[in-house]
Structure formats: C-alpha cells, structure tokens
Image (cartoon, coloured by chain):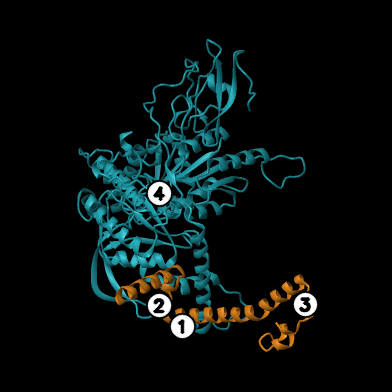
Amino acid sequence: MFSSIKNFISYWYFRYLLVTELYMVEKWERAMFHIILFVLLAIMYVFNTTVTLGLVRMIINSLTSNEDSKRTDYLIDPINVDNSKYDL
Amino acid sequence: MSAAPSLEPSTDYVQTELLNGVNFLNKKVLAAGGDIEFKNFKKLKNGFKNGSCLNGHVLTSANDVNTKELQNGFTLQNDSKKTTDIPKQDHPISKTREIKESFEPPTLLVAALTQISFYILMFLGYLSQALFPPKIVKEKNRDGYPPLYDRFSAFYSRYVYRRVRDCWNYPICSVPGHEVVLKDRVTKDNGWTFEFTGSKTKCLNLASYNYLGFAEASGPCAEAAIASLYKHGISTGGTRQQFGTCELHDELERLTAKFLGVEDAITFGMGFATNALNIPTLLSPGCLVISDEKNHSSLIVGIKLPGATVKVFKHNDVTHLEQLLQEAIYYGQPGQPKGAFKPWKKIVIVVEGIYSMEGTVVRLPEIIALKKKYKAYLYLDEAHSIGAMGKHGKGVVDYFNCDPKDVDILMGTFTKSFGSAGGYIAGTKEFITYLREQSYASRYAWAMSPPLAAQIISVINILMGRDGTNEGQKRIEALARNTRYFRLRLEQMGVIIHGNEDSPVVPILVYLYSKICMMVRTLIKEKIATVGVGYPATPLTQGRIRICLSAGHTKEQLDYALDVIEKVADEIGIKYSRKTRDFTPIEYSKIKIYQDL
C-alpha cells in the first residue's frame, strides 16, 4: 500500500520532470528552478492578497456606493485595519 | 484560361481541377446525345492517371493536342502521323495510387507545454552560464571585436545539447548493418567529457540509412570492393578532370544512367558536394529558385551560392507552388523601372524525393505537371529515395511510374541505400557534358575512391538483377513490407508518426528534449539504437525520434523493437495520437505492399 503510493508519486514526479524539461538538467538547477518558482508564487500570493484583493474590494464598494466606499485606508494597510472602527 | 482558342467549332477547353491544385486544360467534346465529354482526360486521383496526362504529361496549349508531346521542355521527334487527340493507351498503369500522408498536429496543451518547457530550459541554461562560466579557452585582447562565432549556437550547444550529448554521436565499432556494436561510454561531468568503459553493446540498428541492407562486411558487394582495392588502390589521386578517372568511374556512370533510365550520369565522391557545388553551375543572378521549405541544407547551400533569388513553398504544398510559379511568371523580376517587365532567366523547382526529417514523399506527378505547364526546370534530390522507393528501387520516379526524362536534373547519393559514399547527377547527355566541364566538383574535388565505386557497381548490378539472382527484388520488397508493417504497428500504438506510409524514414514525434533523451537512453539500454532529432534539424518544438528501416531487419527484430517502443511510449507518455485506431492484428506476410499495385 505504502510502496504503491510511493511508486505512483515517483512516477508522476518523473512525468512532471519530463514535460518541464527538468529531467535533463542537473540537480542543483532543478532545485534552483523549484526555489525560484516557489519564490515567484509566494510573491504572487502576497501581491494578490494585498493589492488585488484591496482593489477588488474598492471596486465592489464603489459599485455598491456605500458610505464606506470613500474609505481607502485599507489599501495601505489591509491587515491592520481597525475593523471595529468601520464595523465591517 | 477557360476561354482558350478552340480548334474546331464543336470543341473548346475548360479548366478542370484534377490533381490537388493543378489545373489542366480539358478538351470538351460534345458527344452524341448532347452530353459533354472530356475526351483527353479523365477524372483522376492524385498520383496516377490514365489518359494522355499520365505521369505528369500535360498539354499546355491547343497546338499541343494535335501535334507534339512535350518532354523536358523540348519537343520530341516529329510525329506527324500522330494527329489524333486520342489518349495514349500504351501506358500499362491503370490503377490509382493515393498518397497517404499524415501530419497529425499536437494538441494545444502539448504545444503550449513544449513552449513553456523550452523557456524553462533556456532560463536554466542562462542561469547556469552566468553562475558557472564554462571552463573553455577564451580569446583575449579582443576588445572591440564582435564575436567570431554565433553566440546563441555556442550557448545552445553548451547548455542544451551538452546535457543530452550522450544520446548522440555514439562511437560504433562494427559495420552499421541491421545490427551495430556501440562502444559504451560514461560521463561524470554532465556531458562535458566522456570516458570509455571498454565494454561494447550489440544493438539492433534502427538508426542507419541502410535501406536495402547493403552495408555488409561480407557478401558479393564487399568482395567486389576488396577486389578493386588490389587493382586500383584506395584513391586515384586526382580530380575527375585531371588524372583521377579510372575505368570503374566510367563503368559506374554508364551503369547509373542505365539504372535510372536516362541518357547520362556523372558521379562525385561526396553527396553533400554534389548538391552544394553543382547547383551553382546551373544558376546565376536573375534566376528564380522555388524551393521546398524542408529541403536539406546541402540544397540550401547550393542555392544560395550563385546569388539567385529564392522563394520557398510550403512543405509538399502543390497549390502554394503553383501560386508562386504564377506570380513569378506574372510579375517577372522585381526592381525594374516603372512599366518595364523583365522575365526570370529561368525558374528551377528544387525538391527532394523523401524528406529525411519528415518522412514525406514528394508529390512528383503533380510537380512534373506543374513544371511542364509553367516551363520550369525540376531538380529532384533523391538522396534518401533512390533504392528505397519504387518497384525496381529507382526512387520516387519509379514509385510514381513517372518518366525519368521528365525530371531535368536527377540527383541522388550512394551513401544511403548503396552502402557506399558519393553522389550522382543524371540527365540528358548535353546537360551532363556541360556539368563535366563546368562543375566545381568535377574540376576540383577528388574523384570517388575506387572501392566505393566497385561497391556501388555491384549493388546496382544486384538491383537490376544482372547477377542472375532476384536478391535485389527481394530486398526492395522486404524493405517495403518492413516499412508498412512498422508504420501500421506504430499507428496502432497511438504515437504520432509523420510522413508517407511507404517511406522507410519514420519520425515518431515526442516534442520534448527530455523525452528524446529518455527514449534514446532507454532504447539503448534495451539494445536498440535509434536517433533522436531536435533543433536545429527540426523546428524548435518538434523533437522526434527517427527510425530508419532496412531490408535487413527481420520480423522478429521489428517485433522486439515495437514491443520495447510501446513500453517506453507508455512510460514517458508519448501516445499523443487522437486518430481512431484499428486494432486488428497485422499479419506480416499478408501486408499489401505497393509493389502489388
């Protein structure tokens, strides 16, 4: 059971290496690529959770045209917004 | 064109689309009962036809119908008795040969992944180059000089090709017949250097262009070559025009011309130079060359040398070729003063018989028809097809049953099917005499080595049945059967293969470098030698494994190879084909080969 799962994972990891051409590169390059990919994805995650989410929230707010729509301070610091103040 | 001048009140000419994109003039005759009947031509499928446009013969004007038949752009002897427009019936071929070619494109996902992974590879290459500059000799004190070598190709060979270099350039230590002995080697620094382990591996050879299996270390051909060695030595020590000609050369040229069914032939010691050095003698600025996009680099080098204008038509696309021909004739040479018209000096169509990377076969009957219609010359490179195609092994001309005299310049090599080296050009006596005098290869290149010539002579003798056996015919049929069998089995397997069903070059598309090298490595481990092909021999994202079949392979060998390929294909996932598959088992002995037609 355990070995079959291991086989399955290692086979599909091998297929993943094949389609990304990582099969033929050296080990450190493979690691380097994965690190860079991870860093890129992390940056994208941070960007999305801060800037994109804030923009989306702003647009939605402006469409619904609440009084709150004039607020832009959470764009600057979305995590530490004092929610109780605005009663979100 | 539809209103060409009529000869008799009851006839006129209409344009009919017969072959793919080729329009013939059809003579419309009012038959009894008011039906319109096409007297000269019948509805034809691509390839074979009956009637007077058989084998590329085409009547281009009203006068041709009643008077003369055109060949090679010249009118033949006056045949004043032949005044009827009844189609010639003496052509024995009445059956149709359809050209079955497949060019299955990859799915969008595969194409996209191939692109993305190529960028990954490039990125890692540049990263690696920046972090660890290659330990190679660098030129110093060259500030301000531009690099002498192409930067990208240097980068490509160091950081892409080097990683998979163990799949290519394998040293061998036996004759590359149906089996080949590879010298094992290992690399400890990712392909920069190799070490020989001292062991050898005997592999099934699916890599050599040994189509008829004449690459043998023993047998009548090898014996003939060895015998000539004692008489003539290994070289005549001169060029053909000086003192390098021996009787074997003359015999070889006579025999080649006879084998091909043309008036005369000239041979050279090198196949690449046959193209690269002879085409310049035919062309000059002001000539137009229309070249297939997949032509071999020797043709491209030859075309570029004399400074002629080159236009490229899409691979095997007769419609595009006709469009280019029409444009060339209509517009003439560009850059003329306003209102002036200057036609091209001549137009030469350059095509190959079998395209070595695609496995496709040229659409010769249609191209001959076009060449006659537009009065262009045809240069046919039969490097891969001579010996490998046709009922008698005479190349694509034989395969389509065309008249070899319709092709102005027949070129081919002895390197592939004949198990030798060198090339030939065949054509009319006048043309070959001109080449003998003018060609750079005839003037400056060393004459062919006599043992090579002896090998070719004995092979041609076997192929023509002059040795008293039917060995040649057996080999040609074995190759045809092997080809059909292998291609049918691969299609059943579900891999994408390109090319004509009768072409012994079988490219299996695998798209990615990793898959090429994985497959080649696994196949060598399973004792099968194949060739992987990638950029620059193919487009960047169309890597492939190329398999060349031989008459020397037995069914058991092919079955073994197919089983292994199936296993590898499953493992690395190259069963890309979306065609409907027919799973009825294929019986080797019952395969209908094209010789049966």
Q: 10 Å neighbourhood of mark 2: few (<14), some, or many (≥20)? A: some
Look at mark 4 in the image and give the residue it sits on. B383
Residue shown at 46%/49% (left/top)? B103
Question: Crowding at label 3, few (<14), some or many (≥20) Cα neighbours within 10 Å?
Answer: some
- For the residues tagged 4 and 2, is the chain the same? yes
Query: Disc 1 marks which residue?
Result: B135
Foreground mark, 4 or 3, reads 3
- Of residues B484 and B375, the one nearer the viewer is B484
Left or right, B333 with respect to B204, comes to right
Q: Which chain is cyan?
A: B
Alpha carbon of mark 4 to alpha carbon of mark 2: how far?
34 Å
Element type where label 3 sits in the image: helix
Q: Read off the chain for label 2.
A: B
Kind of residue at disc 4: Ala
**Camera-nearest label, 4 or 2:** 2
Q: Answer above or below: position of B154 versus B46.
A: below
Coordinates of residue A20 in the picture (x, y in percent): 47, 70
Mark 2 vs 1: CB contact within 8 A: yes
Which quarter of the image is occupied by the N terminus of chain B?
top right
Please tell me the colour of chain A.
Answer: orange
Q: Quadrant of the C terminus of chain B?
A: top left
The residue indicated by pointer 3 is A69
Disc 4 sits on a residue from what chain? Answer: B
Residue B31: give x, y in percent of width and height. Answer: 53, 13
Residue bearing mark 2: B192
